[in-house]
Image (cartoon, rainbow, N blue to C red):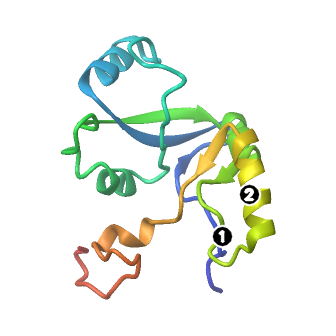
Amino acid sequence: MPPPYRQIRAVYTDDSLTVYQAYDPPIAGSAVAAQRFVPPFKRERMTWIKPSFLWMMYRCGWAAKPGQSRVLAIEITREGFEWALARSCPSHPGRDAGDADRDAWARRLRRSPVRTPPDDAGQLRGRPDGTTEPRGEHGP
């Protein structure tokens, strides 16, 4: 049976889900010390969370990009994650969207508190078009 078109692969329990995000040392250090987000973290900051550690590491340049040198595992409630998904909007319109669809997407984007990025998990093997190629059993 083929996998679903869309699925979330993550570490989870009945009550929580673990996601990952990269931060700069002052934000990460304060969060680790307090075991929650405290200043200098700001809720207004755009944050791309990833349910895959490997995907997060790829996106932050293996913790080498400026401002992304500390990757945190963040446990959130499933209720909170489901709330975010229910209120999310794709960060880009669909490839085949006509003008009317783009206008509807733009209105939805302005109202949405959550953006979902394009599915770029296929880029983990380094191909810019998102396609993958077979590799050895030890991965990329």
Residue under label 1, please give it.
94
What residue is drawn where x is 27% and y is 19%?
A: 26
Can you say whether 32 is above or below 75 in the image?
Answer: above
Observer-nearest residue: 53 or 42? 42
Quarter of the image that includes the N terminus: bottom right
Horizontal and vertical percent for residue 48? 48, 44
What residue is drawn where x is 23% and y is 73%?
A: 140
Q: Is residue 102 left or right of residue 22?
A: right
The label number, if any, that marks residue 74 in the structure image: none
Q: Amino acid at mark 1?
A: Gly
Which residue is farthest front?
Answer: 99
Q: Amino acid at mark 2?
A: Trp
Q: Residues within 10 Å of mark 2 (few under 14, many from 20)?
A: some
Secondary structure at badge 1 equals loop
Secondary structure at badge 2 equals helix
Q: Where, by quadrant of the figure, is residue 100 drawn? A: bottom right
Which residue is farthest left?
Answer: 64
What residue is drawn where x is 48% and y is 19%?
A: 42
Residue under label 2, please give it.
105
Horizontal and vertical percent for residue 139? 25, 74
Horizontal and vertical percent for residue 9? 54, 59
Q: Is residue 35 left or right of residue 14?
A: left
Horizontal and vertical percent for residue 41? 43, 19
Are circles 1 and 2 on residues that touch, CB within 8 Å?
yes
Q: Where, by quadrant of the figure, is residue 70 drawn? A: top left
Q: Residues within 10 Å of mark 1 (few under 14, many from 20)?
A: few
Which one is earlier in the sequence, the residue at label 1 or at label 2? 1
Q: CA distance from mark 1 to mark 2?
A: 9 Å
Observer-nearest residue: 18 or 116? 116
Q: Is residue 36 left or right of residue 109?
A: left
Q: Where, by quadrant of the figure, is residue 136 drawn? A: bottom left
Can you say whether 37 is above or below 53 in the image?
Answer: above
